[in-house]
Image (cartoon, rainbow, N blue to C red):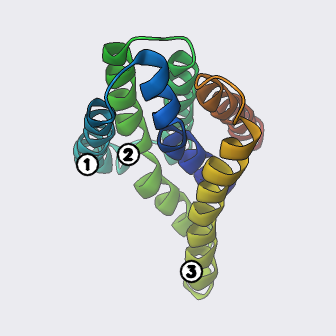
Amino acid sequence: ILTYVMVYLCRLNFSAAVLKISESLEVSTTAMGVVGSLFFISYALGQLVNGFIGDRVSPTYFIMIATIGTGLVNFMMSLVSNIWAIGFLWILNGYFQSIFWGTCNRLLSYYYSGKEHHLISTGMSLSMVAGYVLSWAVLGKLLLESSWQSYFLVPAVVAAFMLCQWFFFA
């Protein structure tokens, strides 16, 4: 469930940073909206592809690949200053993000019985809310005076921490 909090932190940070990016790079909010839309197109297509892949590979390793991918993309977002690079990276993030939902649910179904599924669905729902709160309230407030790049660097560090958790405890 903590993994899914990280997922939302590495997804919603773009929305929290979009106005700062727009102002800093002198890019229209329309262009930023296109980048956000491309994320969701990539995410949807990735769901189709990764659903099939996720049924055939180790879910633990697949989650680790997704965590590495979304962490690296967020780290790279903190280094770029070109709208085209931002667009490309955010499309990649959509793809990596699409791995998590089905794979997390597959893992959770292995470890929890049918009687516990209502607790898991509640936990997953709460993890989404926690991701929203972290992205908007915490990142938004803590990084208000920081550059927009910090909105991506902090989630990249969180993803690195989560990857360590998967590596040592999975």
Q: Earlier in the sequence, mark 3 or mark 1?
A: 1
Q: Quadrant of residue 13?
A: top right
Q: Position of residue 14 (x, y in %)?
A: 48, 37
Q: Position of residue 32 (x, y in %)?
A: 33, 33
Is label 2 in contact with label 1 (beta carbons under 8 Å)?
yes
Residue that label 2 marks: 98
How far apart marks 2 and 1 lie (CA) works out to 7 Å
At a point 36% along the width and 28% down the height, the residue shown is 92
At a point 38% along the width and 45% down the height, the residue shown is 98
Q: Position of residue 34 (x, y in %)?
A: 25, 36
| Relative depth, front residue between 47 and 117 | 47
How far apart marks 3 and 1 lie (CA) works out to 25 Å
At a point 33% along the width and 24% down the height, the residue shown is 87
Residue that label 1 marks: 44
Q: Amino acid at mark 2?
A: Ser
Quadrant location of the C terminus in the rendered image: top right
Element assignment for label 3: helix
Q: Is residue 21 left or right of residue 26?
A: right
Q: Quadrant of residue 147?
A: top right
